[in-house]
Image: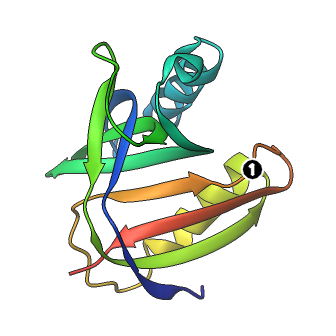
Amino acid sequence: MKYEVVNLEEKVIAGISTVTSNNSPKMTEVIGKLWAELYQGGISQSIKNKVNSYAIGLYSDYSGDNYTVTVGNEISKPENDEITVKVIPAGRYAKFSVHGNMVAAVAEAWGEIWKINLDRSFTGDFEEYLNSDDENADIDIYIALK
């Protein structure tokens, strides 16, 4: 799977979070519920100071097999006390661009990414959804590098 190494500035995102693990049989369900709550639960509409309309799925706070998943939007400054705010650190990232069914394309891409020997820093990996077309989604996946 092809990727390019890019340097990114820090991003601040606001949204909702939970902790899961790739070993959890409910991982997909847990992450799916977060996305549903973001959109059907009205959280997305309540996020103030959005930089753009791109949805972000952030994987951070790695601890053993567990990590925090945060879904939301990039913001210019935090003003939502009831919403989780996370920082995606500035740095080098491997950028993978995928296109297709929003769920299937991302799952397939992650399956390929896990097979690649990247010098990961585990400071924050994220997916940026560049449109909201379920069947023809454009998604960039960024893997933090050392």
Residue 101 vs 9, above or below: the answer is: above
Q: Which residue is mark 1?
A: 131
Quarter of the picture holding the C terminus: bottom left
Residue at screen point 47% across, 32% down: 49
Q: Position of residue 27 (x, y in %)?
A: 43, 36
Instruction: Reply above or below: 103 against 15.
Output: below
- In depth, the one of 77 and 41 nearer the eye is 77
Instruction: Tell me where residue 11 appears, x and y as whole percent.
Output: 35, 54
Which of the pair 32/141 is nearer the observer?
141
Report which quarter residue 44 is drawn in: top right
Residue at horizontal 83 percent and vertical 45 percent from the top: 133
Residue 25 appears in the picture as rendered: no
Residue 129 appears in view? yes
Residue 123 in the image: above or below residue 53 = below
Please name the residue shown 44% across and 31% down the image. Answer: 26
The answer to whether 114 appears left or right of 19 in the picture is right
Which x, y percent locates residue 116? 43, 83
Residue at 54%, 17% (x, y): give it.
37
Q: Would residue 24 be found to the left or right of residue 30 on screen? A: left
Badge 1 amino acid: Asn
In screen coordinates, is 122 left or right of 79? left
Q: Which structural element holds mark 1?
A: loop
Query: Where on the picture, by quarter, is residue 24?
Result: top left
Total labels: the figure holds 1
User: Which scheme is used to colour this image of the protein?
Assistant: rainbow
Q: Quadrant of the N terminus?
A: bottom right
Would you call the spot at circle 1 few (<14 residues within 10 Å), some (14-19), or many (20 or more)?
A: some
